[in-house]
Amino acid sequence: MRTLLALCLLPLLAQAQDWPQFLGPTRNGVAPGMKIAPWPQDGPAVKWERKVGAGFSGPVVAGTRMVLFHREDTEEVVECLDAATGKAHWRVAYPTAYVDDFGFDPGPRATPAIAGGRVYTLGAEGTVQALDLATGKKLWTVQARKEFGADKGFFGMACSPLVEGNAVLLNIGGREGAGIIALDAASGKTRWKATQDEASYSSPVAATLGDKRHALFLTRNKFFSIDPANGAVRFQLDWAPRMRASVSAAVPLAIGDTVFISASYGAGAAAISLKGGSIEKLWSGDDILSSQYASCVERGGFLYGLHGRVDTGPAPSLRCVELATGKVRWSRDGFGGASVSLAGDQLVLLTDKGELVCAGASPAGYKETARAQVLGLGQRAHPALALGRLFARDTRKLVCLQMALEP
C-alpha cells in the first residue's frame, strides 16, 4: 500500500489558477495547470486547518484569499481568510432561522462566487448578498423567497450563484415567471426573469455553443438554455425525475457543442448536440451515468462520474463513459458518494466518508494511485483546487492540503 500511495507521480507545472466559484474557474471541475505530487503514506501535508460550522457550501479561492460560507449557531457567516495561512481578514454574519424539514444539516448549501472584486452568496433561506472582497463591506442584499415567491424546497435553496457579465444568475423557482432570475451584479436590482418551473438543486453554467453564449439550467422538470443577456429561452427539454421526492443536483457540462446532463430517480443521462443552432439528442439512458449529487468531469472525450444514488440501493459506481456514444468503458462498482475533480490526468475524488482518492483519468480502466483519510464522515461540500493546494471541509473542520510540489 505504501508503494501505491506514492504513485501519484506527476511533475509540477505552472501553479494552478484560482477556484473562484462552484466547480472551479470554468465551472467544469477542472483545475487548470495543477499536477498532483507524490503523497506521503499518511496523505498530503496539512498546511493549516480550522473549525467550521454547519453547511455544504464549498470554499472558493481568488488570488491570496479564500472565502468560507457556513452557519454558526443562528447566523449564516461569510469569512475571508488568507489562503496561505488561514488567518482571518474579515467576517460578515446575518441571522437565519432555517430548519431542515428532514433533520439534515441546517447550514448554507450554495457555494459562493467571487467576481469583479465582489463575493456573492445564496443562503439556505434565500438571502442573496454581495460583499466587497477586500473589506467585507455589504454592498446589497436581496431576499429571494420574499421578493420572488420562491419555495425553500425539500432541503433549502441551493443554487451556487453564476456571475455572467454584469449579472448574477440564479435558479430559484420563483413565481410569476421568476423560476430563473438575473440580478445586477453591482446593485442587486432585477435585470430579468424567466421560466415558470420550480428550482432543482442544480446550479447553472455558462458556455459558448456555436457563436452564441448560453446559460444552461436544470430546473425541477426541464433543461433550459437561456440567453444570459436578456433571459430569452433559446430551447427547453423535458427532463424530470419520475418521483416527487427527488433531488437533481448535477451541473450541466458543456464540451464543445455538446452538453451532458444527468440526474437520478429515473431521469437518467443524455448527451445533447447543439451544432448549427439545432438541438439533437445524441444518446440517453438511465443505466449509463445517472448522477444524484456529484457533477461529472470530462477528459479527452470521456466522462468520469458517479452512477447511482447514495441514499438507497447499491453504493454509486465510479464510471468512465464515452461522450460520443454513451458506451460505458469501465465501472468501479460500490465506490460510494464523492465529489469529482480533475487535475491534469488525475481524478481527485473526495468521498462522503472523508477519504481523498487519486485515480487516473483514462478509459483503459480504473487505476487508483493514492488514498488518504483527510476529513470526517458526512462530507458533501465540493473542495477547491487552487494555488497547488486542496481546500476541503466537512461539517466540523476545513483543511488546506499541499497537493503539488511547493516552489
Image (cartoon, grey):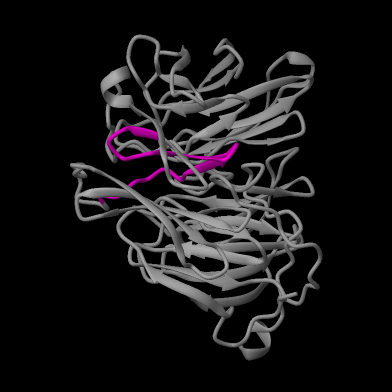
> Which residue sits at x=78%, y=70%?
12
With respect to residue 324, does 142 lie above or below?
above
x and y percentages locating residue 133 in the rendered image: 51, 45
136 relative to 368, above or below: above
Horizontal arrangement in the rendering, residue 307 relative to residue 347 (left or right): left
User: Residue 120 magenta-drawn?
Assistant: yes
Relative depth, front residue between 212 and 265: 212
Which sits in the foreground, 337 or 326?
A: 337
Q: Residue at x 79, y 16 (%)?
A: 276
In this rendering, the answer to whether 215 lies above or below 127 is: above
Q: Residue at x 29, y 38 (%)?
A: 156
In this picture, which residue range is highlighted in magenta?
Answer: 106-129
Q: Position of residue 192 (x, y in %)?
A: 49, 13
Residue 21 appears at what percent x and percent y?
55, 45
Residue 253 colored in magenta in the image:
no
Residue 144, quarter of the rendered image: top left
- Work out whether residue 318 can be spotted: no
Residue 206 percent location from the top left of the image: 63, 30
